[in-house]
Amino acid sequence: MTNPFKLLGISDDVVNAVKDLGFENPTPIQEQAIPVLLEGNNDFVGLAQTGTGKTAAFGLPLIELIDFTTNKPQALILCPTRELCLQIASDIKNYSKNTPGASVVAVYGGANIMQQLREIRNGVQIVVATPGRMLDIIGRKAIDFSNVKYVVLDEADEMLNMGFQEDINDILSTTPDDKKTWLFSATMPPEVRKIARNYMDNPTELTMGTKNTGNVNIEHEYYIVRARDKYAALKRIVDFNPEIFAVVFCKTKMDTQDVAENLIKDGYNADALHGDLSQQQRDKVMQRFRDRNMQLLIATDVAARGIDVNNVTHVINYSLPDEIESYTHRSGRTGRAGKTGISICIINSKEIGKIRQIERIIGKSFTKAELPTGFDVCEKQLFSLVHKVHNVEVNDGQIDQYIPRIMDEFAELSKEDVIKRFASLEFNRFLEYYKNAPDLNATADDRGDRGERGARGARNSDYTRLFINVGSVDEFTRGDLLSFVCNNGKISGKNIGKIDLKGVYSFFEVENASVDTLFSNFKDIQFNNRGVRIEKSGDAAESTSRGGGERRGGFGGGERKSYSGGGERKSYGGGERKSYGGGDRRSSGGSGRREGGSSAGGGFRDFSGKPREGSGERRRRS
């Protein structure tokens, strides 16, 4: 039987590469677009939802049309984010692995530009780029686009949302007038239509489904809760879905940091992805997620673009997007490649109108759902455990040698007792947490809740605020600092309160009952061959209302008790000084903290005291 991709006009070498990737049949967008693009003589506009296989729809024809005996750029693919750039480049490399001479280069900010320039000089036919870094390379006169025959604008709507209109104009002005432009987008706002008018000549337009509609394989639900219960509602949704593998969307970087940090402290396998992370940190987070070593990825809209991960079961909108069209991109992280998925919105009563707007745009109705009770969650978790035990694969050759000792251990227990105890290993944790759990559901008439705002800046008398002499200049995120303190102080993440990450130092709160335990264990600790110390924070550093702002000098007005890991004791004082030249940098006492916001990842890392790679890498716009 002839391979369906070969029937579309794809050569044997590429068909075999696609088969090795597990692709058996083309998706609708591939089936319709590939024959048109293989002709190579038309501009093209393709409208299809995220996750429908657009990369192969333009990637496979490019491989067929390009002359790989010539090491000059012949195709340029522009996309909005680093993650998407890497994903597209990786996919096209896989498609062309059997094609002699094929070379693909990914060009994006946050990585070593000199390495990217070397790859371009060595010869390349397909360049995949983010607009900002591409402009840098063009400005260095390090690339020649005179032989470019095809330009692909992928996720065109999102590039415009991110403000890349002028960059796209400047880049396209360096390409030949007779090139063919292929534009792919999930939605078709007027700005994308304008690109089609300005850069295309009578393009062939292909729309899969109705314009701007959502994926038909995705179910849409919303829960109404009070603002103060939003985080508790998130946890309840996660607990009610034991096999969840989800992307949780927040509106701001700060929210992603807070949510990820709280989930980690509560024992969930989560991490954060946002624009303030270095490229090395972003790559680590995404690799963990792709390998399913992480259950929950907490992300902003921009950072999540280009996340092409299979089998994402849920998208959870912890905050609704400002741009309603962005909801289509968010929900498209699940239900990919013909799979089904669920998109959930956690909203307050004032946001019901926005849900109705989204319904009109995507052409699908939302289901108003009720958050499960504590009893429902416990029951779901119990039977999930039972199913795991029932379906576990038994290695008889290895386990048989231990069976006599196991039977001796259980000799006094009945079969029923053994089952109860195995089930209780995990079940007891949920029983304890959800004992007397309140109903978190709110009604559409439940207005005026301001729960989250009042508590944000409040100080809790049950916690003690501590100082530690490590911070963001040591490449710490808030999740890293949480792990570092808990591992070395031998306390649980649940005993840690607010974390305030600074440059060369940080503050964090610890439950009063755990302070002595932390101090007794936190001795002779070093990081990067430097003694790490923890101190109780003095009153003078507690309030920004004293002395015109937070003091950078001494922490406290009286005697300071220092718990040091050895080494010279340093003072971070002398006021704050700034230098402006190559970016806004601030340093406390000369230590050189780069301004740009704290970067919180959330994943626990290995703090062995060894220097980190990629320290001090400058974040670029793209």
Image (tube, rainbow, N blue to C red):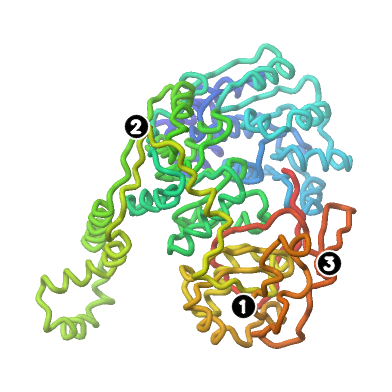
Q: Residue furthest top?
A: 202
Q: Where does label 1 land, which residue?
A: 608
Instruction: Give the left or right position of residue 218, taking residue 608 as reference.
Output: left
Q: Position of residue 123 (x, y in %)?
A: 78, 44
* Residue ID at (27%, 70%): 425
Is label 1 in contact with label 3 (beta carbons under 8 Å)? no
Q: Where does label 3 land, which residue?
A: 575
Reply above or below: 129 against 543: above
> Is there any visible trace of residue 257 in the rendered image?
yes
Q: What element carries label 1?
A: loop
Reply above or below: 331 against 498: above
* Residue ID at (58%, 16%): 205
Q: Where does label 2 land, which residue?
A: 367
- Residue sitting nearer the eye, 598 or 339: 598
Q: Which amino acid does label 1 sit on?
A: Ser
- Residue sitting nearer the eye, 303 or 284: 303
